[in-house]
């Protein structure tokens, strides 16, 4: 329980600080005085004053605020106020007020670029070892003679260290012939393969056309995530366990493990595991559910996720310029994925039960911390992008709602009446509280938290 709480405090603390720092710095740059800079809401636990600003740590760690002169916070109220019109927020031109408010979400997009660029420079971009896993019969890989366990040494004469580098090469050639150098045991062989274009489903279930050869990277059967309340969790499986066999059948890779579980819906299944150097057996009953790849069939599921590259990950370091470029692309991809996910939620294509509260962030932060600090950095960057996107939604109370008011003011030449803004803020607050209650209910149900309250 300690790891999720500590990880949650670290992740959320960083995100709140960076968001509010954006508002604070741009407010000061625009000549607006700041009465209070607070991490958290509610009663003040600790504070100190420097210059005109009081810096506070408050009791409820689910947000923060910057109280500017000439602006009353709809959440906190109070403040010293200021008769100095030159430092008053409300007296500034609308474009300056727009910049100040936008700076908070803007920093939530800037932070992931800094975090991932730093990670790509210091440790490297994580990737899978270029080791061949399952080979589809009759595929280009099978026709070229690739076998499970082969290590790809180079692609068209260019040495590679990650499986992803080979996939990128497939996309860039657009189906042209590729020369692969393989290491098979002590032997090195050269093969030629022609990628085929195929429609595959992405994590959101949408089809994408990609060039591939019918072979997947080897993924160890190591559990990276155990979904609270699901069959694996109830049976006692843990993140970090390596599955050696299911029902006595040896398991050599994640794909074999997933296929074995999917075939055993409703059947008690014995998992032979290695945990902290010890061997043990645990019985789990997979529950029937929808195929995770989006196929229209029911399969067995136990609520576990792969450790991904896990301890077998290989890292490719980048120079500063390349790292920044990769970080910008990564942040853009995550932003687009977040927008698509929200749109699918609105349309009902993704069940509303997927909406999570800070409870889910705490649980996931703890799991990512156990997988390594690089995983926690990428998780923090991911949540920061999500926070930036959500804050820009045109809902009163959120930054996006204020930006909408400023846009209306710029078009009309005058702001909306105070009464209309107050009503909009109240409606926005009600909607957010309703969403939060729903998200907490989802997490209480998902993680079986009620058992701790009995």
Image (tube, rainbow, N blue to C red):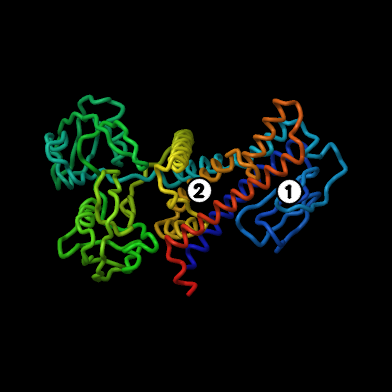
- Find the residue positioned furthest to the bottom: 454
Q: Name the front one of labels 1 and 2.
A: 1
Q: Spatial distance from mark 1 to mark 2, Cα to Cα?
A: 25 Å
Q: Position of residue 273 (x, y in %)?
A: 25, 66
Q: Quadrant of residue 269?
A: bottom left
- Answer with mark 1 or mark 2, whichever residue precedes in sequence: 1
Q: Is residue 229 left or right of residue 163?
A: right
Q: Is residue 332 left or right of residue 222?
A: right
Q: Position of residue 26 (x, y in %)?
A: 69, 38
Q: Is residue 260 left or right of residue 448?
A: left
Total marks in image: 2
Position of residue 440 relative to residue 154, above or below, is: below
Q: Which mark is residue 383?
A: 2
| Secondary element at image label 2 | helix
In this figure, which residue is indicated by the disc labeled 1?
A: 73
Q: Position of residue 194 (x, y in %)?
A: 19, 28
Q: Depth check: 188 or 87 in front? A: 87
């Amino acid at each position: 329980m300690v790891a999720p709480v500590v990880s949650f405090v670290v992740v959320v603390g960083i995100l709140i600080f960076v968001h509010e720092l954006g508002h604070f710095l741009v407010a000061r740059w625009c000549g607006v005085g700041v009465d209070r800079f607070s991490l958290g809401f509610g009663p003040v636990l600790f504070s100190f004053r420097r210059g005109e600003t009081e810096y506070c740590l408050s009791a409820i760690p689910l947000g923060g605020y910057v109280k500017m002169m000439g602006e009353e916070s709809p959440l906190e109220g109070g403040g010293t106020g200021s008769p100095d019109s030159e430092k008053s927020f409300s007296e500034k031109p609308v474009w300056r007020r727009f910049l100040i408010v936008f700076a908070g979400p803007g920093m939530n997009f800037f932070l992931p670029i800094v975090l991932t660029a730093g990670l790509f420079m210091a440790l490297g971009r994580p990737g899978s070892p270029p080791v061949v896993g399952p080979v589809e019969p009759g595929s280009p890989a099978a026709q070229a003679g690739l076998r499970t366990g082969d290590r790809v040494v180079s692609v068209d004469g260019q040495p590679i260290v990650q499986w992803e580098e080979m996939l990128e090469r497939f996309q860039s050639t657009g189906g042209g012939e590729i020369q692969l150098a393989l290491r098979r045991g002590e032997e090195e062989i050269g093969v030629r393969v022609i990628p085929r274009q195929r429609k595959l489903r992405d994590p959101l279930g949408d089809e994408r056309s990609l060039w591939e050869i019918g072979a997947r990277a080897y993924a160890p059967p190591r559990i990276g995530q155990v979904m609270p309340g699901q069959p694996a969790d109830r049976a006692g499986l843990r993140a970090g366990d390596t599955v050696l066999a299911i029902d006595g059948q040896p398991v050599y890779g994640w794909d074999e493990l997933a296929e074995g579980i999917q075939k055993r819906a409703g059947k008690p299944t014995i998992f032979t595991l290695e945990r902290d150097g010890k061997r043990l057996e645990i019985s789990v009953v997979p529950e029937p559910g929808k195929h995770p790849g989006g196929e229209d069939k029911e399969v067995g599921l136990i609520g576990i996720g792969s450790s991904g590259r896990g301890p077998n990950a290989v890292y490719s370091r980048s120079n500063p310029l390349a790292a920044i470029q990769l970080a910008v692309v990564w942040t853009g991809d995550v932003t687009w994925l977040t927008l698509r996910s929200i749109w699918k939620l609105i349309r009902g294509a993704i069940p509303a039960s997927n909406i999570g509260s800070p409870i889910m962030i705490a649980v996931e932060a703890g799991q990512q911390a156990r997988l390594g600090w690089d995983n926690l950095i990428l998780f923090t960057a991911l949540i920061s992008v999500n926070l930036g996107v959500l804050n820009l939604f045109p809902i009163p109370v959120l930054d996006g709602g204020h930006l909408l008011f400023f846009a209306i003011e710029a078009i009309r030449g005058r702001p909306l009446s105070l009464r209309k803004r107050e009503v909009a803020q109240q409606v926005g607050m009600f909607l957010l509280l309703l969403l939060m209650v729903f998200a907490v209910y989802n997490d209480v149900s998902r993680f079986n938290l009620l058992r701790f309250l009995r």
